[in-house]
Amino acid sequence: LALAERGDAAPDQLLAINQARYGLLYRDLDSALAEYASRPVMIAAAWLRWWYDHHPPATRLLDAGCGPGVLTCAYGLALPDAEVVGIDASPEAVACAEELAGRLGARNVSFVIGDYLDPAAGLDDFDQVVAVTALGEAGLYPQHPPAGPDAFSSVADVDGPGAAFRSPGVERLVEHLSIGGSLLLFDRTGDVSQAVRLGAALLNAGVDLDLRQAGGEVFVEEGHPTTF
């Protein structure tokens, strides 16, 4: 936790940190659901409202970084004729997700243990890929601005380094999409640098951004306002 809060952990360190933390959070389904429901930032409710109103049709949906499967099962129940797949690197999380799907009778939902960025996972040709707070936690774009006063206050930065930012991880995620598929993201943007670089990573991965569908929610997270 101390390493994660310092903000300078490398992507592989962030992944190891989160895997260790998730192993504790998801030791059994009831504990996982209790932790999920007790979070001060209930992003799931805000996200699902948006998803129900705006998501395009889907016959195959991938939930990247599915955790205990709460959202994955919601997608499956809302799309009973679609194949819904959740993937998470934590075996404990996937075990909880499978049990939850069984409890809810979500028979069109399945789960995979693995890294959604690993080609060996064999996940391709989805017409909808959903990632809710998964990209930042995986270290796919900067979570903190670099040192220096007002590092991201100028138009020059937005049009220069910000616009040029690329993320191999985002590019790999986009490869899971079938032609004409949709990538739906909901993530933290604690400062403008994150939003600029996430947007640039998507554009540079070949995603055609539709900002008419974009929106924002502000939550108080650990005493500080955070934009999603």
Image (cartoon, grey):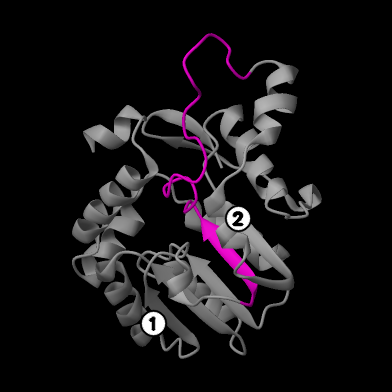
Can you see residue 171?
yes
Q: Is residue 105 above or below residue 132?
A: below
| Disc on res. 166 | none
Of the 4 image quadrants, the one containing the N terminus is top left
On the picture, is 103 further left or further right than 52? left
**The one of 220 and 172 positioned closer to us in this rendering:** 172
The residue lying toward the viewer, choosing from 5 and 166, is 166
In percent of width and height, residue 21 lies at 24, 52
Residue 101 circle label: 1
Distance Cα–Cα, label 1 vs label 2: 30 Å
Amino acid at the residue labelled 2: Glu
Q: Residue at x 47, y 34 (%)?
A: 143
Q: How far across and down, in percent of the image, does residue 13 sit?
A: 30, 43
- Say whether marks 1 and 2 touch (CB < 8 Å): no
Q: Amino acid at mark 1?
A: Ala
Residue under pointer 2: 171
Q: Residue at x 59, y 29 (%)?
A: 193
The answer to if 140 sits in the magenta stretch is yes
Residue 73 at least partly seen: no
Query: Dividing the picture into quarters, in which one does residue 164 lie?
Result: top right
Question: How many marks overall?
Answer: 2
Marked residue nearer the N-terminal end (1 or 2):
1
Crowding near the residue tagged with mark 1, few <14, some 14–19, many ≥20 C-alpha atoms within 10 Å:
many
Vertical position of residue 86 compared to residue 107: above or below: above
Q: Which secondary structure is most common in the magenta stretch?
A: loop
Which residue shows up at 23% across the image and 69% down it? 30
Please tell me which residue is depicted at 27% across the width and 47% down the height of the picture: 17
Towards the viewer: 67 or 135: 135
Picture quadrant where residue 163 is located: top right
Highlighted magenta segment, given as a residue range: 125-152
